[in-house]
Amino acid sequence: SKARFGAYSAAEMRKFVEWALKQPDGWQKWITLLLAYTGARRGGIAKLEKSQIKFDEDSQRYYLLIAEGGQGKTENATRQVAIH
């Protein structure tokens, strides 16, 4: 069999999302949904704080400000991750 690395299939992602939507409001539900709908890395989502959730007035969309490796030592270490 051929080993697969790095990505889930569309069917697997649907199962994750379906499972998460059935969960009560708690960290398992919201972390799973954020991972599914942002494509952000697990470490970035795990360290996410409420203050990092932003709203862009121009596009009328929410996004996350994620600092790679914790707080981010430089401005370039922080990136915006759109919530789709």
Image: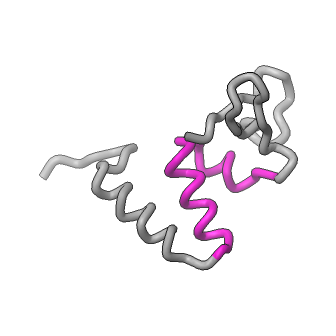
Region of the chain picked out in magenta, as a range:
25-49
Q: Is residue 17 above or below residue 9?
A: below
Q: Which x, y percent locates residue 9?
A: 30, 49
Q: Quadrant of the C terminus?
A: top right
Residue at position x 44%, y 71% in the image: 19
The question of residue 14 being in magenta is answered with: no
Which residue sits at x=68%, y=35%? 61
What is the tally of numbered marks visible in this picture? 0
Q: Is residue 71 left or right of residue 1?
A: right
Magenta stretch, overall SS: helix
> Of 68 and 66, which appears nearest the observer?
66
Left or right: where does residue 54 sit relative to residue 41?
A: right
Tell me: residue 40, above or below residue 15. above
Way the structure is coloured: one colour
Query: What residue lies at 66% left-to-right and 49% top-to-bottom?
Result: 43
Give the x, y percent position of residue 12: 32, 58
Where is residue 8 shown, x and y percent of the image?
Answer: 35, 50
Q: Is residue 68 left or right of residue 8?
A: right
User: Residue at the location (61% across, 78% down)?
Assistant: 24
Q: Position of residue 3 (x, y in %)?
A: 23, 48
Hey, which residue is sitting farthest bottom in the picture?
Answer: 24
